[in-house]
Amino acid sequence: MVATSYLIQNATVLPFTPQGDGSLDLQPQQVDVLVMGDRITQVAPHLEPPTAQTHVIDATDHLLIPGFVNAHAHSVEILEKGRYESMPLELWMLYTYPPLQRQHLTPRLCYLRTMLGALEQVKSGATTIQDDLIEMPYVTPEIFAAVAQAYLDLGLRVSLTHHVINLPLHQTIPFLGDFLPADLRQELETLEGLSDQDWISLCKDFYQTWHQRDGLLTLALAPSAPQRVTPDLMHQIADLSADFNLPIHTHMLETRTQAVTGPVFYGEGESVVSYAKTHGILTHRTAIAHGIWLTERDIELIAEAGATVIHNVVSNHRLCSGIAPIRQLMDAGVTIALGSDGMSSNDSFNMFDVIKAAGLTHAVTQPDYSRYPKARDVLTWATQGGARSALLQDDIGAIAPGKKADLVLYDLTTTSFTPQADLPIHLVYAERGQSIRKVFINGQLVVDQGQVLTVNEADLLAELRSLLPDYETLRQEIVDQAERLKPAIEATYQKAMATPFPINRFSQLDRDFA
C-alpha cells in the first residue's frame, strides 16, 4: 500500500521546536510542510509535490501548529457531564466512581461513551489524549479493548492506562474509618477485586496486545494514587515501568484532605509525594495529575526525580480543590502539562477552555505581574509538556522533519485572529477551536471543515442515545449507593479541613480551617 502524502503550501507555521534555552520556537514562518505517511519529511519554502498522487493543500492565510495534548482525562466520566457542581473531590467521587459498584458496563456502551469524548477532542484541536481508564470495580479486558478500539477507529492518538486501586475506600482517606458504619465497612472490605498478580498480568497482557497498535496507542501504568495502592504493588508497577519504559500516570495532592493524608497515614513530615518516592513510583517517567497541595519539599522531590505535573485547572476549580503552585513549579524547572480531567469535573474535552483558564488563573496569585505565565508558557504546556508526560516527546509536539504528522490548520481570516497580532496570544485567549479547518493525526486527515472523516458521527451518537435510558437506571443505583456513604464522607471532609496544615492553596483561607 502506497503511503498517503500531503503538501501543505504557503502556511504560516509556528514550529514549536525546542531552542537551546529550553523555550520553543513560536516565531511565525511562511513555509511549506511535506507529510509522507505518518511523518513530516520536509519544512521549507517553495517545496514541490514529490509525486503526482501527493495531495496539495493551499494554506494561504492559514496557521499550522502541532495538535494539543490533553494530558489527563477519564473517559469513564463522559456520560456524567452536566450533572454536578461545587462538590469537593471526596464527595463527588461517590457519584462518579462509586466504591460499592459491582456491575460492569457493557463494552459497547464503553466504546460509544469513549467515542463521544474523542469526537469533541479531535474537533477542537487536540490530537493526543491520555485516558486514565477507570472502571469500577476494575477494568476488564473487554472494556479495555472497547475503549482502545474507539480511539483507533477515530484515529486519535492515545496514551491509555489501566487504572489500579487495590485498597478499600476507608483505607485511602484519613479519618473515614472513624465515621463509617460497620455494615458499610464490611461491604467495602468484601467487594470482589483483583489480586496483585492479576493486576500485573493484565498490564502485561495489555502491553503485548495493544502497545504501539496502529502507531497510535501507547500504554501507561496508572497506580491511582500512592495512598490507594499497596507498597508491594507500587514496587511491581515501578519495575514494569523500568522494564518496558512506560509512563507512570498517577494522582497526587489534589485536595487538602490528601495533603493531610501523608502526616496522618505515614507520620509527621511525610507526604504522599515522599511516600511515592519511597515505593518507587516517583521517577522521570512519572506524570502527576493535579499537584495542588504541594509543599516546597514536595516540589523539590518532583524536580529531582524529573517528573511531570499535569495542571487540570478547570477541574481543580470545579471540584473546589485549590490553586496549584504553578509559578513555584516553573521556578524549580518542573515540566508542566495540561489536562481537561474528566467530563464530570469539567464537562468538556475542549483544550481551549483549559488553555485560557491556565493563562488567566495564575495572573492573580501574586502582585508581581512579571512572574505570571505568558501565552508562550501555556502553549508549551499544551504541546511539549503533554508530550513529555506520555514519554512521546521524541515523536509529537513540534513541526519538524521526523516528527509525527499531528497537525492542526486554522483559518487566520476569522474573528478570532483579526486583527492578526501576536499569534500565541490569539491562540490562548481568543480562539476556542472555531477556526479549525483540518486536523491531521499520524499523517491521516481526520477532520476536514468540521467533519470527522473516519467514523459516522451521527450514527454513533444516535446509537449512544438509544442506550442512555438503561444507563440512567444504573445511575440511580449509583446515586443510592452514594447517599449511603455521604454522611461519613462529609464528616471526614470537615475533620480534614480542621486538621492543621502548613500551606494554603485556596484563594481565601476560612479562619475555621486555619
Image (tube, rainbow, N blue to C red):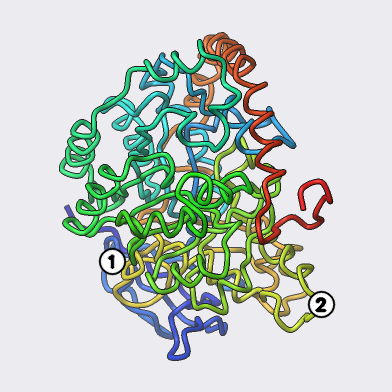
Q: Is residue 234 left or right of residue 73?
A: left
Residue 188, percent from left and from top:
44, 19
In the figure, 449 relative to 46: above or below? above
Observer-nearest of 256 and 415: 256
Question: At 60% across and 69% down in the image, what residue appears?
Answer: 378
Amino acid tagged 2: Pro
Under tag 1, what secondary structure?
A: strand
Residue at 38% across / 21% down in the picture? 108
**Camera-side residue of 424 and 454:** 424
Give the left or right position of residue 27, taking residue 69 as reference. Answer: right
SS for callout 2: loop
How far from the left and from the top, in percent, is residue 438? 51, 56
Choose between 99 and 62: the one closer to the eye: 99
The residue located at (48%, 72%) in the rendering is 300
481 lies above or below 131: above
Res. 81 image quadrant: top right
Relative to 445, 59 lies left or right = right
Question: Residue extending furthest front?
Answer: 268
Seen in the image, is 245 located left or right of residue 72? left
Mark-to-mark CA distance, 2 and 1: 49 Å
Mark 2 crowdedness (10 Å alpha carbons): few <14, some 14-19, many ≥20: few
Q: Amino acid at mark 1?
A: Met
Q: Which mark is residue 367?
A: 2
Q: Of label 2 and label 1, which has the lower sequence position?
A: 1
How many neighbours does mark 1 have within 10 angstroms: few (below 14), some (14-19), or many (20 or more)? many
Work out which residue is located at the far bottom of the displayed protein and give it. Answer: 20
Q: Which residue is mark 1?
A: 36
Q: Residue at x 33, y 37 (%)?
A: 148
Q: Position of residue 275 (x, y in %)?
A: 40, 54
